[in-house]
Image (tube, rainbow, N blue to C red):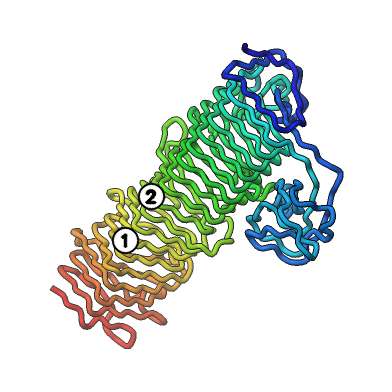
């Protein structure tokens, strides 16, 4: 029969199978919860924290993927035991790279133990790891339940405090210090805290669960389907939310996978997929849909994550611009939606980011960290950019490489960062009458591809180099009527133009316009059709030079200083 729970239960037993057979569980009138307690579930399964604690300061650095820890004295440790391992915090109060429940797999000599976890972050010598022995609940499974959270459902609308519903609301399941505990087939509605709440859990599955219409998506920590804190080796699959805050939240967790999960009704900004930014690492998201952000909860926790992979994801907003290292995005489609983000925003951090087959409208590259040796590559992607979009933000000092991409709607797009920007076989299409791209990168390399009705204007805020070749085509015109040009900034510009073609039907549009500053210009083997070449006397005095030779000019009006010791325009084929 259907059930009514009026008590909140805590269990410490292992090896339980609770199958509700699809019956409805209600909780009207359930006893009040305590303050800020997502573990006050109808069924809370909790392991035991023992009094055995070991602290040890590392005498040597631990590299990424290490699984052998110094513990000083290994005698308290036995193979098969479970311990929590917590490193001391960095600058943020809760900024720790290590917070996991691990099992001892081997006792080694020299006061060392091996555990069932390879760390995801380097730990320097001198860091202190605190070990606490725990006895987790094991193999406690909850399945096949329709759960209705307790009323009242109405209350403060925007997360204001106090909110009495944190005491009167209900949710079905919570685990703390648990191993091999699975949840499947819970269809929940109107719940307050996460439907499935986990902390200090290792080896688990959450499958075929759903949440509809929680009372709030604004109160901190409330309105989730599932949250995992300090968790390892989890698998969340085939889940769904409607009008919820988060479908899945991974906090300080690692080696987890989320697949075929879908969140709708997220117009209020309740992004279904999130990570907290407390040094999560090695997470995979595959075949999901719904708003997503990564590592966005604030400096207190470190705003850091590493080796996050997202494949075949569709949403209207995707933000990953904090200290996220080695992010991989494959076939991520960000589609503008008038009811939430008409801009279709996608932002990433230039710290080992690699993107393949992605699309968005408002795309931006930020940089908050520089930990990776992996190149930043955006490959086979398409972006329909709004007017004046800052494509590469000011802090970006790492190189960024666009390969076989398509950028459309380009009108005054800005690349402010100092890091090298490369366009290889990339198509850039300007808006009619739009301004050229304004680029502040120390180096701009265009190899192959096509620029149409746009162009590159160097800001000259620093010394810059621009190289164009590889059979590239730059064509059309723009509002500046100059396809390659520079601003009147203090930087010296090195121009290296080679195997490329430039064509315009507008006699007043310059293929290259150099009007001021220090310039070291070389064009050898380029092909120009129509329009003009404009080299002002003021741009080629002092340290500047101009070498324009071996080029073909068809119907081009060229204005250049007279040849001299630092000026040479001979050897040009002009018709």
Q: Quadrant of residue 23?
A: top right
Q: 223 or 385, which is in the foreground?
A: 223
Which residue is label 2 attached to? Answer: 357
Q: Check disc 1 and report its element: helix, strand or loop.
A: loop
Residue name at image x 28 percent, y 50 percent = 433
Q: 255 or 401, which is in the foreground?
A: 255
> Which residue is outermost to the top?
1
Left or right of 28? Residue 508 is: left
Is residue 108 in view? yes
* Quarter that holds the C terminus: bottom left
Which residue is label 1 attached to? Answer: 425
| Numbered disc in front, either 2 or 1 | 2
Q: Check disc 2 and report its element: helix, strand or loop.
A: loop
Residue 524 percent coordinates (x, y): 27, 77
* Quarter that holds the N terminus: top right
Q: Earlier in the sequence, mark 2 or mark 1?
A: 2
Q: Is residue 155 above or below residue 66?
A: above
Marks 2 and 1 sit apart, C-alpha to C-alpha, by: 15 Å
Is residue 394 in view? no
Residue name at image x 54 percent, y 38 percent = 273
Residue 80 percent coordinates (x, y): 74, 48
Residue 167 percent coordinates (x, y): 73, 22
């Amino acid at each position: 029969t259907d059930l009514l729970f009026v008590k909140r239960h805590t269990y410490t037993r292992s090896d339980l199978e609770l199958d509700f057979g699809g019956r409805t569980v209600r909780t009207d009138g359930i006893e009040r919860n305590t303050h800020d307690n997502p573990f006050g579930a109808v069924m809370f399964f909790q392991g035991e924290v023992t009094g055995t604690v070991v602290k040890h300061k590392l005498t040597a650095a631990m590299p990424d993927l290490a699984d052998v820890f110094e513990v000083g004295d290994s005698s308290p440790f036995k193979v098969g035991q479970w311990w929590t391992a917590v490193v001391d915090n960095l600058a943020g109060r809760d900024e720790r790279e290590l917070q996991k429940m691990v099992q001892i797999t081997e006792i080694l000599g020299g006061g060392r133990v091996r555990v069932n976890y390879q760390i995801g972050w380097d730990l320097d010598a001198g860091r202190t790891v605190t070990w606490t022995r725990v006895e987790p609940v094991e193999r406690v499974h909850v399945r096949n339940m329709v759960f209705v959270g307790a009323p009242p459902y109405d209350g403060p609308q925007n997360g204001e405090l106090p909110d009495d519903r944190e005491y009167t609301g209900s949710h079905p399941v919570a685990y703390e210090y648990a191993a091999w505990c699975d949840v499947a087939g819970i269809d929940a509605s109107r719940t307050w805290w996460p439907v499935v709440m986990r902390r200090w859990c290792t080896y688990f599955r959450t499958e075929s669960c759903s949440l509809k219409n929680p009372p709030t998506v604004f109160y901190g920590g409330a309105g989730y389907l599932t949250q995992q804190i300090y968790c390892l080796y989890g698998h969340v699959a085939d889940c769904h939310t409607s009008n919820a805050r988060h479908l899945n939240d991974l906090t300080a967790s690692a080696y987890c996978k989320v697949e075929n999960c879908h969140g709708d009704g997220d117009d209020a900004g309740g992004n279904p997929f999130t990570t907290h930014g407390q040094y999560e690492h090695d997470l995979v998201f595959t075949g999901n849909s719904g708003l997503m952000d990564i590592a966005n909860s604030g400096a207190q926790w470190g705003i850091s994550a590493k080796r996050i992979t997202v494949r075949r994801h569709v949403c209207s907003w995707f933000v990953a611009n904090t200290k996220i290292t080695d992010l991989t995005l494959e076939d991520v489609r960000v589609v503008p939606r008038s009811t939430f983000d008409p801009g279709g925003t996608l932002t990433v951090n230039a710290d080992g980011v690699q993107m393949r087959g992605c699309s968005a409208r408002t795309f931006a590259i930020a940089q908050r960290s520089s930990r990776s040796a992996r190149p930043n590559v955006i490959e086979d992607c398409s972006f329909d950019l709004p007017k004046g979009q800052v494509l590469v933000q000011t802090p970006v000092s790492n190189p960024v490489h666009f390969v076989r991409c398509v950028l459309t709607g380009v009108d005054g797009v800005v690349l402010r960062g100092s890091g090298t920007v490369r366009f290889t076989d990339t198509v850039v299409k300007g808006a009619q009458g739009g301004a050229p791209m304004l680029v502040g990168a120390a180096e701009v390399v265009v190899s192959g591809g096509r620029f149409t009705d746009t162009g590159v204007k160097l800001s000259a805020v620093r010394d810059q180099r621009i190289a164009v070749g590889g059979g590239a085509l730059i064509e059309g015109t723009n509002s500046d009527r100059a396809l390659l040009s520079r601003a009147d900034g203090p930087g010296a510009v090195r121009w290296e133009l080679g195997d490329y073609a430039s064509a315009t039907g507008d006699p007043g549009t310059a293929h290259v316009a150099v009007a001021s500053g220090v310039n070291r210009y070389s064009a050898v083997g380029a092909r120009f059709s129509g329009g003009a070449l404009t080299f002002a006397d003021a741009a080629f005095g002092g340290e500047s030079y101009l070498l324009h030779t071996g080029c073909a000019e068809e119907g081009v009006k060229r204005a250049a200083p007279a040849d001299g010791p630092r000026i040479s325009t001979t050897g040009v084929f002009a018709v």
